[in-house]
Image (cartoon, rainbow, N blue to C red):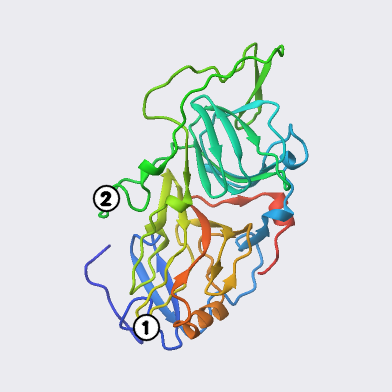
């Protein structure tokens, strides 16, 4: 059981995640860093292993994946990972949807990695740009219209949850940290006139589907709405990052939205920890109760560029963490860097995720 008494056995640093003196910091914790915890101090790198079998880390460059909507306007996103609580997909749409869509199994949360454009929704038009989160409530009808550009595509990380996505309840910091809801963009209704076609296609996305509905009028015909269930966008530039000068904070501090069994976090640019001896990179861990997806949006880690579009999957029970060389560099160049400018989107899931065949076929095979 949890206790205010924490035991200390053998050789341990005095401070948490600091002054390791050559040891390797490995955390064995329950409930995603918020439950019972053991910090183990090892001689060797716990990620220095070779794996065989399904429970192994997967690393894939999203640019190597080929969603159907990248080449066919009538195509859809590519499923990357799924379990009973969520589906995580990749979209790279070049052309406007010639149909409308409606996700009827759960809420939809999309991160805009590249591109800009317009979403026509029942709540009104929503412009999107790089770094935006786009929230679409369960069964909301919408249509995507990417902006024409030299690249001509919008890259979306799409997270569909079977439970309702909610903003986390306010903690000790209050209602505006880290996510200030007043910075969200909420649409005004603008009904769209019919354009003369015989019917309008609405695809219902669901398990065992899709199903298609055909309307004789444009389904974006809402004159007005009221309530507290609506679509919105929120840009990561408006996220209030919580920091500490003396200890690297756990990922759960950066929670953005959550549903049953699904937690979405933003790891964004911030001042680096400044107290000498403090470890600035996340400690080794094995996600005892959660699978972890990390999507690299951009930035660097103390001078080491992070590959944009890299997707990593760390299954629960399997060690992962920044390479030891990156940790050594962060210590060696402690006085040269006052900030960390990473941009990483993380999704933790209580149930194990199953990688799709396409993801496994493009695994970089680092383990």
Q: Position of residue 119 (x, y in %)?
A: 58, 33
Furthest-left residue in view? 4
Q: In which quadrant is the N terminus drawn?
A: bottom left
Q: Image check: 329 left or right of 114? A: left
Which of the pair 65/7 is nearer the observer? Answer: 65
> Residue 253, labelled with which disc?
none
Furthest-right residue in view? 71
Question: In percent of the image, x 60 and y 32: which residue is there?
Answer: 207
Q: Image check: 209 left or right of 29? A: right
Label 2 environment density (alpha carbons within 10 Å; few <14, some 14–19, many ≥20):
few
Q: Position of residue 314 (x, y in %)?
A: 56, 61
In contact (CB < 8 Å): disc 2 and disc 1 = no
Question: Circle 1 is placed at which residue position?
Answer: 276
Question: In percent of the image, x 72 and y 40: which residue is there?
Answer: 94
Label 1 environment density (alpha carbons within 10 Å; few <14, some 14–19, many ≥20):
few
323 is higher (above) or lower (below) than 349: below
Tell me, yes or no, if residue 64 can be seen here: yes
Which of the pair 332/336 is nearer the observer? Answer: 336
Tell me, yes or no, if residue 282 can be seen here: no
Q: Image check: 97 left or right of 88? A: right
Question: In percent of the image, x 69 and y 32: which residue is there?
Answer: 96
Label 2, label 1: how many angstroms apart (C-alpha)?
A: 30 Å
Q: For the residue labelled by badge 1, is the local secondary structure a helix, a strand or a loop? A: loop
Question: In percent of the image, x 62 and y 33: which residue is there?
Answer: 144
Q: For the residue labelled by badge 2, is the local secondary structure a helix, a strand or a loop? A: loop
Q: Position of residue 293 (x, y in %)?
A: 55, 56
Q: In which quadrant is the C terminus drawn?
A: bottom right
Question: Circle 2 is placed at which residue position?
Answer: 174
Number of marks in picture: 2
Q: Position of residue 345 (x, y in %)?
A: 52, 55
């Amino acid at each position: 059981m949890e206790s205010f008494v924490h035991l200390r056995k053998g050789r341990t640093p005095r401070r948490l995640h600091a002054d390791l003196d050559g040891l390797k910091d490995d955390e064995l914790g329950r409930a995603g860093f918020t439950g019972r915890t053991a910090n183990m101090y090892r001689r060797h790198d716990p990620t220095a292993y070779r794996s065989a079998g399904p429970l192994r880390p997967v690393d894939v460059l999203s640019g190597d994946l080929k969603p159907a909507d990248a080449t066919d306007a009538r195509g859809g996103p590519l499923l990357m990972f799924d379990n009973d609580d969520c589906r995580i997909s990749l979209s790279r749409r070049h052309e406007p949807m010639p149909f409308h869509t409606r996700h009827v199994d759960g809420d939809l949360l999309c991160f805009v990695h590249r591109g800009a454009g317009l979403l026509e929704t029942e709540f009104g038009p929503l412009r999107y740009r790089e770094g935006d989160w786009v929230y679409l409530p369960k069964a909301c009808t919408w249509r995507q219209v990417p902006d024409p550009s030299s690249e001509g595509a919008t890259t979306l990380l799409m997270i569909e949850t079977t439970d309702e996505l909610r903003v986390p309840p306010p903690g000790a910091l209050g209602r505006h940290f880290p996510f200030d809801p007043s910075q969200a963009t909420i649409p005004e209704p603008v009904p769209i006139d019919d354009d003369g076609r015989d019917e309008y296609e609405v695809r219902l996305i669901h398990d065992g589907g899709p199903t298609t509905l055909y309307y004789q009028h444009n389904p974006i015909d809402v004159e007005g709405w009221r309530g507290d269930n609506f679509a919105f966008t929120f840009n990561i530039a408006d996220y209030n990052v919580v920091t500490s000068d003396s200890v690297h904070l756990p990922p759960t501090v950066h929670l953005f939205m959550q549903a049953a069994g699904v937690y979405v976090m933003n790891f964004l640019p911030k001042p680096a920890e400044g107290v000498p001896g403090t470890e600035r990179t996340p400690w080794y861990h094995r996600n005892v109760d959660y699978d972890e997806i990390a999507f690299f949006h951009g930035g660097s880690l103390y001078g080491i560029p992070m590959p944009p579009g890299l997707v990593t999957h760390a299954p629960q029970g399997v060690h992962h963490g920044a390479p030891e060389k990156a940790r050594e560099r962060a210590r060696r160049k402690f006085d040269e860097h006052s900030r960390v400018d990473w941009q990483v989107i993380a999704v933790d899931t209580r149930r194990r995720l199953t990688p799709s065949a396409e993801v496994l076929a493009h695994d970089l095979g680092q383990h």
